[in-house]
Amino acid sequence: MEKPAISKSRSQQASKVDKPTSNVHEHAETGRSFWPFKPLSGLYQDVFIILSWIAIWQIGRIVEYTEHASVWFPAAGYTLACFLVLGWRAVVPIMVAAIAITVWNGHNYLLPLSNVEMMWGGVLFGVAHMLPYYAGASVLGHLLRKPDVTTPQLIVSFLIIGCISSLVATQLVIGSLVLTNQMSAADIKEAMLPFWIGDMAGVVVLAPLFAGLLVKISAASKIDLLAFSNCASSDLHSYFKKVAINLALILFVMLLAKLTQSRDSAFAIFFLAITHMWIACTESTKRNVISLAISSLCIVLLVHIFALMDYVKVYQFALNVIAANALFGIAIPQLQADNALLKDRVFVDTLTQAYTREYLAQRSALEMAQSRESGSSLYFVMFDLDKFKRINDELGHVDGDNALRRLSQVTKDIVRKADVFARFGGDEFVLLLPNISEQNALNLVEKVREGINAIVISEVSLSSSFGVTLMQQSDTLETLIQRADRALYASKEKGGNTITLK
């Protein structure tokens, strides 16, 4: 190793350790499906949809505060989910369920209609109910199948589609009820808003959960939700703790509304947005959707149990706002993962896993500024493989790539955490060595040289040449590169496998 004399470097007093940016990896939430049986198809699937749709409709009746108006309408969310997952195959079973429930509803409300008239009303109700949600599900399904759609785009699209579909469904269904004498035209104005908000709550809060369940149990799903279950989650104990805190908050604010009998107290339910955003930002999409369903079910049941029907519209709006807020929170972990992946692609070389030239430029500016401010040293090292073109030509590009990967691994095992190792281009690499003495810098470079010499690719031993330079106060990154490149060229002229300091 040749070591020309240079001017003494400044004393190395400051200690500075700057950890390189770490990679962020997504962790898929694993576990067996909750559905232990063979996925449903054909007649079995149709019967399941009919029975489950009727059951879900009846659940909505628990918190019905006037005819045709409930705190929420879960069947709306279920219909959208059925069309999203099953497409047109859900039309017949939902129509059968709509007719059945209309006949039951007519008898329950003691409507002066014959069974035939009620069945005809069920057909109109089914058409009016299904058309908007089928159209909305078709648009949403198209977006889900697009490879370039982002999570925020999907969430915004889902909320807009849910709002518009439920509004159109409200108008069409109310029209069909009036047309078939199941509802008085005089009641339209009073029923329109709560009807719409109840439908929208059913869609926004429950459609994601229902879609996830249907994907699990259906043998012919039209969508794949795997991309939305790849975010990291906490352990189950931590998740249950968050859900418990959430439920305790619901119980407290709704009990407060009951005891004070004040509309102002009812608005305290909006504080729930805070805990749901906490869950959304720290848990997987699946857990977030489940916690939304649990909270909404708790709210609607407590409205009924605590007799808070006077404030029902507050709770209806709260369900929609909290759900929308939480759904936007889903995008945060996904965006963090996407940003980390993008940063890796920009800052980490795919072949060698060394930092890229772009990262080197940014980090060099920071290290040079810190070196000037603290007076500490900064060594810039440029090196490459000797006769790399010959390795590629004689052994092939596969062995050439393997040589670069092995060189990178050896170098990363030797350098310090504070050092920067980057691929400059081709077989050229760069080391930034901050806050290090001249002798220690040369010793580290020598270890790298010896490590590369120990690499054997297809019975060919590797060697490398190095150019080392110390940053001066007047240096820019360009001048450092030029000086290190001249030192590297000098090593090549001496036959390679050499370290030159300029």
Image: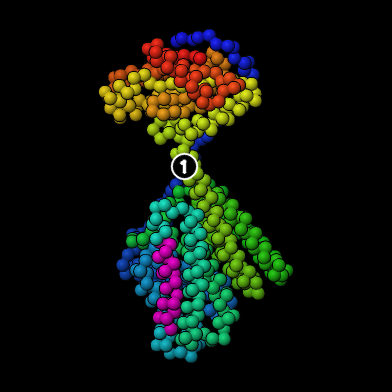
Residue 61 in the image: x percent, y percent?
53, 75
Task: State how many labels appear.
Answer: 1
Q: Nearer the viewer, residue 9 or 302?
A: 9
Q: Is residue 151 visible?
A: yes
Residue in view at x 40 percent, y 22 percent = 384
Residue 168 located within the stretch drawn in magenta? no
Residue in view at x 48 percent, y 34 percent = 358
Q: For mark 1, give the secondary structure.
A: helix
The 10 Å Cα crowd at callout 1, few under 14, some 14 to 19, many 20 or more, is some
The residue under label 1 is: 341
Q: Nearer the viewer, residue 7 or 76?
A: 7
Residue 50 in the image: x percent, y percent?
39, 72
Residue in view at x 50 percent, y 69 percent = 164
Q: Nearer the viewer, residue 427 or 87?
A: 427
Principal secondary structure, stretch drawn in magenta? helix
Q: Bounds of the magenta span?
A: 121-141
Residue in view at x 58 percent, y 30 percent = 366
Q: Nearer the viewer, residue 16 or 228?
A: 16
Q: Is residue 228 above or below residue 105?
A: above
Q: Is residue 7 above or below residue 153?
A: above
Q: Amino acid at mark 1?
A: Leu
Q: Residue furthest left?
A: 394
- Quadrant in which the N terminus appears: top left
Q: Is residue 360 above or below residue 119?
A: above
Residue 135 located within the stretch drawn in magenta? yes
**The image quarter in which residue 322 lies:** bottom right
**The image quarter in which residue 448 lies:** top left
Question: Colour mode?
Answer: rainbow
Q: Is residue 301 visible?
A: no
Residue 85 in the image: x percent, y percent?
39, 63
